[in-house]
Amino acid sequence: MLDHLSLLVRDLPRSTRFYTAALAPLGAVVGYSDENTAGLGLPDAPQLWLAGAKEVQPIHLAFRAKNREQVRQFYAAAIAAGARDNGEPGLRTHYHPHYYGAFVLDPDGHNIEAVCHSPE
């Protein structure tokens, strides 16, 4: 249903580096960038737009992974890129039996998740 969304960040270059690294395991690349914005997503269609702002209100944002290995790779890449742990990769059966997710806090405190809904 969503085509794209914008996420406000305090330091655009830092956040662009962070999201480029963290979302690489999910196949995302930077498709557009200038001094004010960066668009990440599929090579021909940015879906996540980063925009610099003085004030940021943290939100929760979840990215769908193709499999559980991608969730684990996302988590490792995000932590290596400077994220803070907010929930290691694992099942969250209180959502549904196959909900496998990992949560990190990005440099601005946004709760970023990668999730797979399929069995192993």
Image: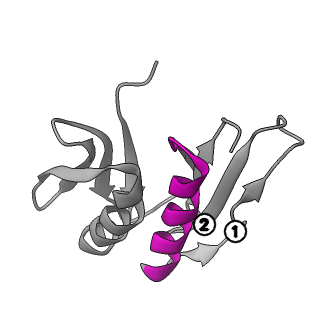
Q: Position of residue 98 (x, y in %)?
A: 77, 38
Mark 2 to mark 1 CA distance (whole Å): 5 Å
Which range of residues does the magenta coloring cover? 64-80
Specify the label residue 78 is tagged with.
Answer: none
Q: Position of residue 65 (x, y in %)?
A: 51, 44
Of residue 3 and residue 97, the one placed in the foreground of this image is: 97
User: Please, is residue 17 above or below residue 117 in the view?
Assistant: below
Q: Position of residue 32 (x, y in %)?
A: 13, 49
Residue type at tag 1:
Asn
- Seen in the image, is 31 located left or right of residue 19? left
Do labels 2 and 1 touch, CB within 8 Å?
yes
Of residue 68 and residue 3, the one placed in the foreground of this image is: 68
Tag 1 residue: 86
Q: Earlier in the sequence, mark 2 or mark 1?
A: 1
Q: Secondary structure at mark 1?
A: loop
The reply to whether residue 32 is in sight is yes
